[in-house]
Image: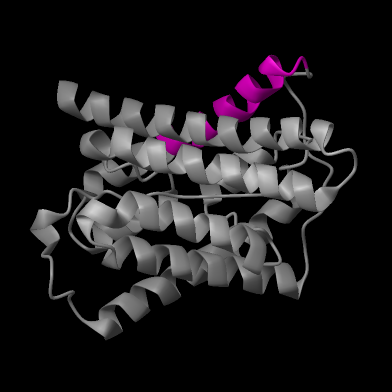
Amino acid sequence: MLRFRSRLMAECLGTLLLLCIVVGSGIMAERLAGGNVAIALLANAAATVAGLYVLIEVFGPISGAHMNPLVSLAMVWRGELERSACVPYVLAQLLGAALGAWLAHGMFDLPILQFSSKIRSGNGQWIAEAVATAGLLLVILRAPQAKVSAMVACYIGAAYWFTASTSFANPAAAFGRMFSDSFAGIAPISVPGFMLAELAGAVVGMAMDRALGKPASSAAHDRQQINGGFIVP
């Protein structure tokens, strides 16, 4: 029981720090960029890449560093996470996501409780989220264990720029970011569309992984479910 509590704490804390990094760096970037959105996004992406790498390295050995409900579902599907652990993992991730946004607000002297007014909607945004999530799941499921932290972080950094949605690729991230009316926020009305697109992308990513077959260099029992989940405005 103590070990399971540690895993849940790692998922909650990891997701909290991830959202704090995403939201906080977005606030700082917007304040310092002087209205240049490209510079703000570059700073936001760089902070996310660095933070995500560190979080996976720190929390991976404890809980797998999922920080993403779809990653947890994928690990259940692969038999690398107990089914009974899935719902507690997801709840811990959602709680951490909200707390992370609120912590970022506190650091920047903003109202703690707020909702985003930034509408993110339309076919392009939804297709982008599906693509971003499919790619993320494919990287997580196929990356060699020793390289997964760097590969996931690099993929998310790239997806900030090649997707129209700036790659949330994570329902917990969308959930947490709707509580922040900042650079990284998303309006609550836009969240269901993002989550559905992410779910569709995860299914595609898992299907691609299965179609490609088992990686020759590793077996499922060698992985410690070290993955990641990201995000971006």
Q: Position of residue 219 (x, y in %)?
A: 10, 65
Does residue 5 appear to the left or right of 169 in the view shown? left
Residue 209 falls in which quadrant of the image? bottom left
Residue at the spot x=31%, y=34% of the render?
59
Whether residue 102 is in magenta: the answer is yes
Residue at the spot x=36%, y=80% of the render?
208
Could you say which is closer to the camera, residue 61 or residue 119? 61
Could you say which is closer to the camera, residue 217 or residue 231? 217
Q: Position of residue 135 (x, y in %)?
A: 46, 69
Q: Position of residue 76 (x, y in %)?
A: 25, 56
Q: Quadrant of the N terminus?
A: top left
Residue at the spot x=64%, y=74% of the render?
127
Residue 169 shows up from this direction? no
Does residue 230 appear to the left or right of 55 in the view shown? right
Could you say which is closer to the camera, residue 142 or residue 207? 142
What range is drawn magenta here?
A: 92-109
Magenta segment, prevailing SS (helix, strand or loop): helix
Residue 19 shows up from this direction? yes
Whether residue 103 is in magenta: the answer is yes
